[in-house]
Amino acid sequence: MEKTVLVIAANSLSGESCGRPLSLDLSLGKGKASSNTKTVPKSVWTCCVQGVVKYVRVTFDLFPDQRQVCVAAVDYTKCQPVNSWRDEDQELGKVLAGFQKFGQPCTVPVTPPTGHIPTLLSPCIQGIQYGVRCLAQLTATQYAATTSPGHTPPSNQGRLILLCSLRSSSDIKDLEDILVRLVRSENSDIRQKGDPARLAIAQCQLVIVNSYTTPTSDVKDAPLTQLSSHVSSIVYSFPAHLLVDKCLLLCQLHHDLNTTLITGIPMKEEQSGSGSANYDVELIHLSEAHRDILRGGFVLGGGAMGKKGEKEAKDRLSLKWSTPKTSSLELQPCTSAYRVTPTSVTSRPTICLVNFVLSGKPVLLEQPRKGAQKLITHVLMNHAGSIYLHCIPSTRNHVEDPPSISEGWGGRITDYRISDFSELAASNMLSPIPEDRTKAPHRFPLQIVMSKLERESRHWPLVYADTLIYTLSQDLHPLPVVVRRDAMSEQDFEECKKVIKSLQSKEAGGEGLSVPSTGTRAKGVKRDEQYRLMWSELESLTDTFRTNSELHHRLAEVVAQATSHAPSMQLARKTPHGGGERSGDSNHWPPPGNGYRESGDHEGGGIGASGTTVWDQDRGNMDPRTQRYERGSGPVGGGGASQFLPRPAPPIGSVAKIWATRQASIASSGHAEFAGRMTFGPKAELYLKLHSNSSIVPPDQDT
């Protein structure tokens, strides 16, 4: 979920001590034993604030632009937002300043002028009301998506975390019922008013975190329960002094995070600068960072969260500090990179490690192995003030030793369009943009690049055996490039018309196409067959992009008209029907009436599961996008014209008609036909004598 609302509700129980006081050393001397130590009680409210601060810090560090958190504080007298959905408020400094502005909460019930006596649930109800209104408000990302023309509004899903102190399980039930009614009422109000600044709540998950000081509360943990079609609820209950660690674990659960423990960090002792010791620092990141390690067979550390909420290692990975003896130039072949943030930002080992990495020095990390050679698997590096955990492949270098493309899917195929694919990848390379997303552009950059990639790969044969026009760069330039654009100018349209007229002139003058000598399926094919394949694929290409613009539609009509008047296509249409034997001329094969398609083909033809060539019924020619060679163990694209000859064509008709005819013949040979069906046809009327006997059945009634 993208949106999270954190609400702290302060009631009469929030001012109690959590049972773990703070010890303050008031001595002024340095290096002397402390004799003036004072303990300060720590309230439940302070624990809640610390837990919320840790939750939002981890979220802001790891997801600065993806996931947003809004915080609010409520007591008996006021309900005040700590920050908002604006991008400038999504930082830890704004949250701390908001709590400072809120001040000390009022934990004593104050009777309002209306005479209504506030209860223990009054701050919680106000907090839920604010949370529902906050979830209905649009964030900057949602506003940009809703105002973008031609795009459906996004689904408004969010999470409402309520930190409070309750006494009985009936209070939980009351809060859940109130939330269901509030969400239903808010959605109804949004639909009636049509407010552009709000969006109906599609899914709201209520997370109730109950903290207590004494075990007298009967509020127990409850699993995730679906309260209605739009609301679900889950309950956690634990002592108040464990709230900070519990909020950290909740953040890991909500955002799919995991931890890595960096061990063996050498540091000088603070007291004596001569000695040194090894320390450990725990880092938080996405769980995907352990993916490459798990694939390599490395077992993560066990452990789970205890029932009392103690912080234990849960699927935590331990990596050891490694002192490198090489330069940073050897740290390039990394498979992935993930943002990291420390679990404890105030500890001295964490501060030293963070400052070391931010200074520009990479930190190599190795797997702790017994009696084996050092294995470097990760590296910590600084990028623009943020620390990233890079995964280094432990088996094979993905940069210097790529797999052979001839050993991929489809067997040992050697005519992949490798150079064209490199150009496609280079033209769709992503890069950061300076535009601020809070300006609500009409289309997101990701939507623009996805649309461009879909348009350029809409007609993109994988191998040269499937295409002819992409090998005729001299004859067709720039038509294949122009037709894939989102918009076409009049100049581009005229250039494409010149290309089509040039092809018509070449075919009329008996001039052959500039087909490369190797790597194309037209090698060794007669000139008329080459033109027929070229016109068919060219028509299919322009028809695929017909809906891009008006000029694309006009270009498709021009190509279709040129194809219909091409001599090679006319020769293919004049081929006589019937005949199961092929003639000697390749232009008279296959017969146009004997084509068929497999049921799973794409438009214009395809390849059946048995490897047979699929024919175009409309023109009686092989579809240029899906042609394959029939036999031979050599690579596709080699050989002469004999490899283009298909198997004998099947009987006339579709696959369904062939199957029905065969089933009928099998059924007819199995038993004698029903006599009534043979006499009266498919439907035979029963009880004919009843119609003739008027005493039994009146003539004006139906039988």
Image (cartoon, rainbow, N blue to C red):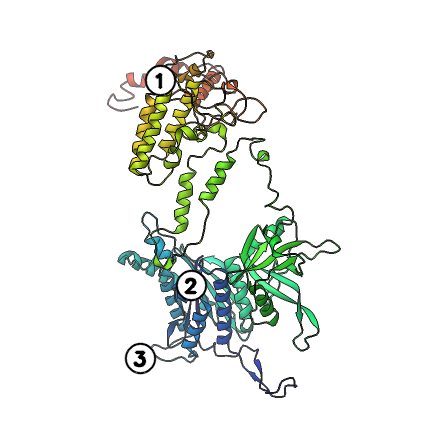
Viewer-side residue, 691 vs 446: 446
Q: Is residue 561 above or below residue 331?
A: above
Q: Which residue corresponds to the image point at 58% horizontal and 51% vertical from the top-left?
A: 334
Residue sitting at x 29%, y 59%: 195
Image: 57 above or below 148: below
Residue 97 location (% of width, % of height): 43, 74
Q: Position of residue 14 (x, y in %)?
A: 47, 76
Q: Furthest residue to the left?
A: 700
Mark drawn on residue 176: 2
Quote the CA–CA distance across marks 3 and 1: 93 Å
Depth check, mark 1 against mark 2: the one in front is: 1
Residue 314 falls in which quadrant of the image?
bottom right
Which quadrant holds residue 245?
bottom right
- Residue at (52%, 23%) from the top-left corner? 629
In the foreground, 293 or 161: 293
- Residue denoted by label 3: 113
The crowd level at tag 3 (other Cα within 10 Å; few <14, some 14-19, many 20+) is: few
Q: Secondary structure at mark 3?
A: loop
Measure the alpha-carbon separation of dots 1 and 2. Answer: 74 Å
Judged left or right of residue 418, residue 83 is left
The amino acid type found where label 3 is placed reads Pro
Could you say which is closer to the camera, residue 601 or residue 362?
362
Relative to 671, residue 521 above or below: below
Regarding residue 98, the answer to whether it shows in the image is yes
Amino acid at the residue labelled 1:
Gln
- Quadrant where the N terminus sits is bottom left
Q: Is residue 454 left or right of residue 272?
A: left
Which badge, 1 or 2, comes first in the chain's sequence? 2
Instruction: Find the distance from the CA under tag 3 to the CA under tag 2.
Output: 28 Å
Do residues under tags 3 and 2 come within 8 Å of each other at their CB atoms? no
Q: Position of residue 313 (x, y in %)?
A: 62, 62
Report which residue position mark 1 lands on.
Answer: 570
